[in-house]
Amino acid sequence: ASTIVVTGLALMLFSPRFVLFEYRDTWSVVLGMKQLVFLLMVFFGFGYARMLAAAGRSSAPGDAPAVGKQLVVIRMRQFHRYSVILAIAGILLAALLPSF
């Protein structure tokens, strides 16, 4: 993941077209969308990790009932789907950048 961040930042910062928070042409808009997708992937990744930790806790007396654990698993599946969709969107947006 750190390789993606470093190479993405390097390609962005070394491009003469990049101006921070300016979206005047199509290339800048696509780059902004790609950055948003990446931030959402990080957000869902942290959420998934937190839910994975919650699902891994043992069920001791007084803990949340099994229904609560099932809801965590359902939410984890949703976050996993969102992450896959965002990853595909990020790849497609990255592939579009050179064409502008």
Image: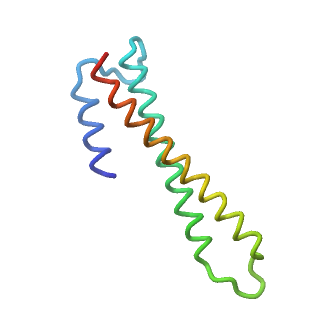
Outermost residue on the bottom side: it is 61
Q: Position of residue 100 (x, y in %)?
A: 31, 16
Residue 71 falls left or right of residue 6: right
Q: Does residue 51 sit above or below 30 in this rendering?
A: below
State the residue at coordinates (36%, 18%).
27
State the residue at coordinates (41%, 11%).
24
Q: Position of residue 94 (x, y in %)?
A: 34, 31
Q: Does residue 62 sit above or below 80 in this rendering?
A: below
Residue 18 falls left or right of residue 52: left
Q: Position of residue 54 (x, y in %)?
A: 61, 70
Residue toward you, 59 or 15: 59
Q: Position of residue 66 (x, y in %)?
A: 75, 75
Residue 76 location, quadrant: bottom right
Residue toward you, 85 or 14: 85
State the scheme by which the image is colored.
rainbow
State the residue at coordinates (23%, 19%).
16
How many numbered callouts?
A: 0
State the residue at coordinates (61%, 72%).
55
Q: Does residue 31 sit above or below 38 in this rendering?
A: above
